Amino acid sequence: MQNLGSGKWLLALAGALLLAACGSPSNSTPSATPISENMSVEEARSVSNNLELQGRAPEQQVVFDFSGKVEEGPSKDTTLMGKLTLELKPVGGGHFVFMGALTGTNLNVPAKGVLTRGGRIYIFFEVDKANNLLIIGTGKREAGGVFKGPFVGPAAGDRGSWTATPVSGPTPMPTPQPQKLSYDFSGLVEDGPAKGTKLEGRLNLEVRLKEGYGRLEGKLVLADGSEIPVKGALAGDKKVFVIFDLGKGGRIVGEGDVQADKSIQGPFILVQQENGRTSLSQGSWTAMPIP
């Protein structure tokens, strides 16, 4: 087997296969930090700060009537009221991460957090992201789906309590409509048994995108009219993973970064099967968008 000299190629291969697999709605992707009923606030915030690592788009939406009041501290008697809309992402084991916002009259505060299988919630309101001002709430689901609990912030010493009463949901998130994209694709094998091999054609994709995450599927049409099936995934709006099925166990596994001009560039591994043996070659590819 070809020695690629760097673990990043194998990581790219594993990452592409993983993200392609987790595109199926029936799969659950584990979170970067294990979620449990007794996790710390710091652990919950770490999970919510790494939503892009979950590899899944939100699947359910819940809307609450939210009210909170600062009961002691510099902001005493300050109230916070509005509609709290949360979009839930399953991350395995019956746990969820979520993103959303608290909205009302002259109010639009981003929110994110963690909801455990047992109904414990950790919620972080980004009052002023630039200055890292947060309202941090914890709570527990009660009868009727109502959540209640204490909170701290945004000022040092502020403490209060909050209640969120469900008014709708959970309802399924809308199924994203596929977006059709075409690219001029060019790839060159730069090292390995297939060094010097070129692959060029028109890459036609259907992308189902939701909150920057999604699946892609399509074909690479070569100059002679032959077609290579392509599947892959988007991790956020900057990273693309693709798998080209060459047949007979052969495949191209690539990752790419989306550039400012919407082109995609990155490395790939060419996996070939011959006489029961596997060989690996490496190269780079570019996909230029076709208007």
Image: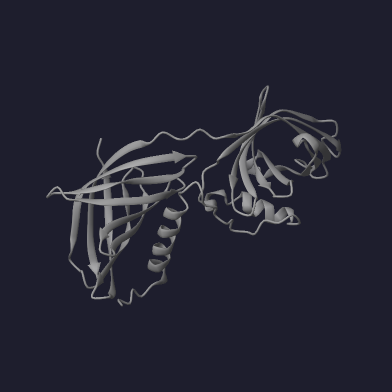
Q: Is residue 109 visible?
A: no
Percent position of residue 84, x then y: 68, 32
Is residue 18 shown above or below 62?
below
Identity of the residue furthest to the left in this view: 224
Q: Residue at x 45, y 49 (%)?
A: 23
Q: How is the image coloured?
A: one colour
Q: Quadrant of the C terminus?
A: top left
Percent position of residue 219, x then y: 26, 47
Q: Residue at x 67, y 56 (%)?
A: 35
Asked which quadrant contains residue 113, the reply is top right
97 left or right of 17? right
Q: Residue at x 72, y 46 (%)?
A: 122
163 left or right of 28? right
Depth check: give the residue in front, 107 or 122: 122
Depth check: give the residue in front, 273 or 136: 273
Percent position of residue 183, x then y: 26, 44
Number of marks in the rendered image: 0
Depth check: give the residue in front, 199 or 217: 217
Q: Residue at x 40, y 62 (%)?
A: 12
Percent position of residue 89, x then y: 58, 45
Is residue 282 shown above or below 16?
below
Q: Quadrant of the N terminus?
A: bottom left
Asked which quadrant contains residue 32, the reply is bottom right
203 left or right of 100? left
Is residue 270 shown above or below 65?
below
Q: Is residue 260 visible?
A: yes
Identity of the residue furthest to the right in this view: 72
